[in-house]
Image (cartoon, grey):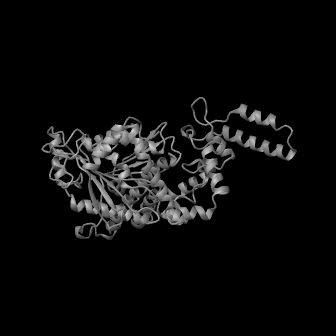
Amino acid sequence: ETSLRASLAPPRAPPYFTANRSLYAKKDPSGEGMALHHHHDHRHHNRNQGLHPQKRDNFKYFHNVLTKIHKANFSNFHLIHHHPHLSFSPESPDQITRYISSHIMPLGMQNKLRDNGTFRSLSDMAVTSSVPCMGIVNPRAAMNFLFLTKHMIQLDYGFGHPSQKIHLFLPSSPESPGDINGISASSSDNNHVNEKSVKGLVFFVHGGAWGSGCAWMYRLVALPFVKANIAVAIVGYRTYPDGNVQDQVDDLYSAARMLQMKYPHLWQRRGDSKRNEQKEEISRGSSQSSFGVCLMGHSSGAHISMLLMVQQVEKKVMNLMSGSQGDKGNDDTISFDSFIGLSGVYNIQHHFDYEAGRGVEEISPMKPACGYTREAFDYYSPALRIHRLTKMYNDSTGINADSIMSELIPPVLLVHGMDDETVPFTSTSEAARIMRSCGAQYCSEYYLSETGHTDVIMHFMMGGRSKDAVMRWLEGEVFHGNKQADIGLPSKL
């Protein structure tokens, strides 16, 4: 029972054509969980009557194993749901990519395309060429994109790399002209932005498999937030091969520091004195409040965003253990009031195994960006980092770290599409389970049926369920102080 549970633990997938894979890939028609279809086994049994005696013995053994597993009475086994990616045999798209990587495209060519920037160029070119088509299909989205471009504030940070840019969008204050989209009409300064009119700041990090993507491609993500009086900073960063994962995290840190210095009124934390005054206004009937600064990322952007958050928590724990937490002058950490991960990768080693199953692990930038080795994969896995930090604190101090982590880890919302074939939704369920086991007091999960990897982020650009869920969660944060805000579904499915 223990080994079976381990083999089914998300997001690790049992190998193809094994008894465990068969069990996990089939759904009980009654809806009570997984079960074997006995007519399927009898069909194979009749088909194999003429097999060689040795093969018949092997088949009989296999059938007996399946039957034994089926009869096993596991605790909470009914909670295991059908996984859309774990069919008994490889799906057609996976078969195609595995065939191409093993028979058509040599390993050296895959690595060369990945390491010389060709992968990035082709990926970015594909997105750029699709923009005119989007304008034809959805003219309103094209108009919104142009309007956002007109009123965008572009900020450079870092050391001048072309990707080190922030695209900042500010909501208009009641005194400013604004427009129907609620965007500040001033693109040169923030004179028209009133602190009391801004409910918070979303620090958004785009995805792109660690090796592609630009801030401008995600410009439409800002629209629903700005309409809700929320400022948005869409952060560009160095992608592989110009930078590895730690370089990308460092870029996010530098961008956050620059925003903190240049726009301190936008980087007001929920716990600041001014925010406490606003909370008192709410209690007296005022409708304005702020949820502070929300760190939000999609796909690989969710990975490096959570890694940034975890590294800041690590610094604070180290300062706490060394007794230097009260020295404000030496405190170089950055704090966020909430974290939202969209279709994110949080365990690099497990995702590498998943990419290997699809046959894309050698052309994907993830392997070199995350250090090539299994040890490096673990080091750059934010969920595992927070787990190791908790254990280290417990072992070093003899004190349970739950209370510390509940204070240092902000409220978390993880959103994932159930039909995601790029990053399986079990990546989110595993991360949430680890975060809660380490003391994270508020960690919600939201799963969207019939939703793929890009659908989740497109919902913010064109309207959709993931956008609605995130906005409801943020509104629960702002108006009710409910860190486990109801977003329409149970926190865990």
Answer above or below: position of 410 versus 331.
Answer: above
Residue found at x 87% / y 44%: 53
Residue 303 lies in quadrant? bottom left
Q: Please provide percent x and percent y for residue 4.
A: 63, 48
Q: Nearer the viewer, residue 250 or 478?
A: 250
Residue found at x 57% / y 57%: 361
Answer above or below: position of 272 versus 130.
Answer: below
Q: How many numbered badges does the structure rendering display?
A: 0
Answer above or below: position of 60 versus 363.
Answer: above
Q: What is the residue that sits farthest to the top in this orientation?
A: 30
Q: Is residue 398 visible?
A: no
Q: Left or right? Give the position of 386 relative to 223.
A: right
Q: Nearer the viewer, residue 261 or 213?
A: 213
Q: Is residue 158 visible?
A: yes
Residue 162 lies in quadrant? bottom left
Q: What is the residue that sits farthest to the left in this orientation?
A: 175
Q: Please provide percent x and percent y for residue 485.
A: 33, 40
Q: Nearer the viewer, residue 96 or 129?
A: 129
Residue found at x 75% / y 44%: 62
Residue found at x 50% / y 61%: 118
Q: Please provide percent x and percent y for residue 12.
A: 57, 51
Q: Nearer the viewer, residue 133 or 433?
A: 133
Q: Left or right? Give the position of 240 relative to 36.
A: left
Q: Please provide percent x and percent y for residue 16.
A: 66, 48
Residue 326 lies in quadrant? bottom left
